[in-house]
């Protein structure tokens, strides 16, 4: 079995499946927000399989929704881009 992970700034790591789920729902026009420990879903095109996937990935979806990227360098050219570190790919069996 292999696990694919997404590495974000400041050491945040999440399963790629959770990252892909959030992007997929956003592309469908669904907005996710947080209310305490709950994920609130806003939108009409929400399917049963979406609910099941959110249930499986809820802890990681909560982390991703709370994540704030440091994008200051995109707005101010005098600020250097943050150090991202090396990209490491490992297959776990």
Image (cartoon, rainbow, N blue to C red):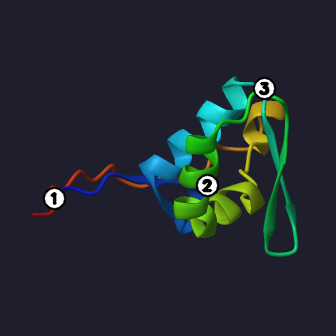
Looking at the image, which residue is at 74% across and 43% down?
Answer: 71
The residue pinned by badge 1 equals 1
The residue pinned by badge 2 equals 54
Distance from Cα at disc 3 to Cα at disc 2: 16 Å
In-front residue for pair 12/24: 24
Looking at the image, which residue is at 74% across and 56% down?
Answer: 65
The residue pinned by badge 3 equals 29
The C terminus - image quarter: bottom left
Q: Are marks 1 and 3 in contact (CB under 8 Å)?
A: no
Name the spot of residue 23 as percent of width and height, x first: 62, 35
Q: Residues within 10 Å of mark 1 (few under 14, many from 20)?
A: few
Left or right: where does residue 91 sit relative to residue 60? left
Name the spot of residue 5 as percent of width and height, x first: 38, 55
Looking at the image, which residue is at 85% across and 33% down?
Answer: 43
Q: Residues within 10 Å of mark 2 (few under 14, many from 20)?
A: some
Upstream in the sequence, badge 3 or badge 2? 3
Q: Are marks 1 and 2 in contact (CB under 8 Å)?
A: no
The N terminus - image quarter: bottom left
Please give the label number shown on residue 32: none
Task: Reply above or below: 29 against 92.
Answer: above
Q: Secondary structure at mark 1?
A: loop
Q: Secondary structure at mark 3?
A: loop
């Amino acid at each position: 079995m292999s696990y694919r992970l997404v590495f974000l700034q400041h050491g945040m790591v999440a399963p790629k499946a959770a990252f892909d789920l959030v992007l997929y729902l956003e592309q469908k026009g669904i907005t996710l927000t947080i209310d305490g420990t709950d994920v609130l879903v806003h939108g009409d095109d929400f399917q049963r399989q979406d609910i099941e996937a959110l249930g499986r990935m809820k802890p990681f979806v909560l982390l991703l929704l709370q994540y704030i990227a440091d994008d200051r360098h995109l707005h101010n050219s005098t600020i250097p881009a943050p150090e991202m570190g090396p990209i490491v790919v490992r297959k776990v069996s």
